[in-house]
């Protein structure tokens, strides 16, 4: 089985807080920007992908995203406050505009399945979640 990679995403406080309260269970990213970044992650050459490589053309033509992205580390703005989620059913589709997707545009949809420990990727226990809330002063 291939190792599942972690993708780090910076979110606006509004979206981060909704996910933390379990009000939002998906994260959206524009295909035109993130398709190139995801391709670069797969090739392990993030500085060299310009969107015109064979991998980007293949991903764009098929409108698919790699299945080896298994975790999202979500950052609350540019702070050290993070949470890690296991993702399932990553796909390209039209998103819900009320949850941050642009209207009438296909986006990468990351379905957030369960909150996990960022190191072990085991399901986060209530004790772990409480420790993180106390550590960062979140009520």
Image (cartoon, helix red, strand yellow):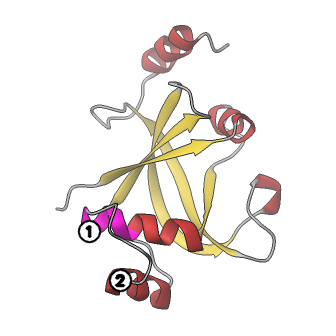
Which residue matches tag 2? 53
The numbered mark at residue 66 is none
The residue depicted at 58 percent of the width and 74 percent of the height is: 32
Q: Residue furthest bottom?
A: 61
> On the image, which quarter does residue 137 sit in?
top right
In the image, the segment drawn in magenta is 39-44
The rendered magenta stretch, by its main secondary structure, is classed as helix
Circle 2 crowding by C-alpha within 10 Å: few under 14, some 14–19, many from 20? few
Nearer the observer, 36 or 87: 36
Quarter of the rendering occupied by the N terminus: bottom left
- In the current view of this chain or complex, which residue is farthest to the left? 1
56 in relation to 23, above or below: below
- x%, y% of residue 86? 43, 47
Q: Is residue 1 left or right of residue 102?
A: left
In percent of the image, x 46 and y 59: which residue is there? 88
Q: Which residue bears the numbered disc 1? A: 43
In the image, residue 29 lies in the stretch drawn in magenta? no
Residue 43 falls within the magenta-colored stretch:
yes
Left or right, residue 94 beside residue 10: right
The residue sitting at 19% across, 61% down in the picture is 2
In the image, is 124 to the left or to the right of 138?
A: left
Q: Residue at x 49, y 65 (%)?
A: 90
- Disc count in the image? 2
**Left or right placement of residue 90 versus residue 42 in this view:** right
| Contact? badges 1 and 2 (CB < 8 Å) | yes
- Residue 14 appears in the picture as rendered: yes
Q: Position of residue 99 (x, y in %)?
A: 76, 53
Q: CA distance from mark 1 to mark 2?
A: 10 Å
Horizontal and vertical percent position of residue 45: 27, 63
> Label 1 crowding class (10 Å Cα cut-off): few <14, some 14-19, many 20+?
few
């Amino acid at each position: 089985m291939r190792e599942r990679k972690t993708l780090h995403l910076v979110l606006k406080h509004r979206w981060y807080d909704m996910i933390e309260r379990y009000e939002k269970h998906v994260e959206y990213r524009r295909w035109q920007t993130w398709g190139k970044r995801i391709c670069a992650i797969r090739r392990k050459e993030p500085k060299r992908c310009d969107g015109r490589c064979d991998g980007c053309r293949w991903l764009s033509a098929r409108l698919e995203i790699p299945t080896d992205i298994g975790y999202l580390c979500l950052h609350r703005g540019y702070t050290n406050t993070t949470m890690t989620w296991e993702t399932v059913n990553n796909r390209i589709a039209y998103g819900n505009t009320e949850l941050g997707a642009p209207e009438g545009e296909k986006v990468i949809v990351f379905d957030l399945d369960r909150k996990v420990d960022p190191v072990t990727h085991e399901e986060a226990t209530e004790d772990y979640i409480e420790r993180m809330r106390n550590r960062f002063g979140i009520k």
